[in-house]
Image (spheres, grey):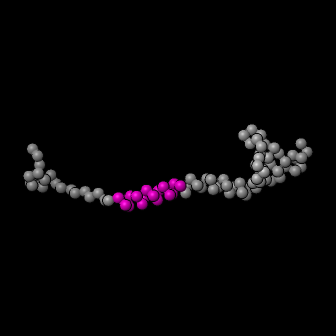
Amino acid sequence: MQTQETKNHFNLNGPWIGWRVRGRDLVSPEGERVNPERLRGLLWRDENNGRVAAARSRKAAAEAARERQPVKVVVVSLGEYRANGLAVG
């Protein structure tokens, strides 16, 4: 207990079994140390990967829309249509 309080050494349990806190670092079961700045950076990157993927998806959709042929709409009045003999009836 004294080591925990004076040196900030904690062994974690539950889903974090095998991980431990040593000083200001989080230590993995393999011995890799993660300081608070690195952990903050990893969490920031993970959060922003979704934003980057969404932006790429929007850009790809916009480029695909530009490559499609435009649709032409022709407006003809009903009177002109009947005058040319095209109306059935």
Q: Quadrant of the N terminus?
A: top right
Q: Magenta includes 63?
A: yes
Q: Quadrant of residue 48 in the image?
A: bottom right
Q: From this view, report whether residue 82 is shown above or below residue 1.
A: below
Q: Position of residue 41 (x, y in %)?
A: 68, 57
Q: Which residues are magenta?
A: 53-68
Q: Looking at the picture, does residue 62 appear above or below residue 9?
A: below
Residue at far top of view: 14
| Closer-to-camera residue (82/45) | 45
Is residue 40 rendered magenta in the image? no
Picture residue at 16% right of the left edge, 54% below the top: 77
Closest to the observer: 47 or 68?
A: 68
Residue extending farthest to the front is 30
How many numbered marks does the figure carry? 0
Q: Nearer the viewer, residue 61 or 81?
A: 61
Rendered image quadrant of residue 63? bottom left
Report x, y in % for residue 2: 91, 45
Front position in the image: 81 or 64: 64
Left or right: residue 53 compared with residue 86 = right
What secondary structure do most residues of the magenta stretch adopt?
Answer: helix
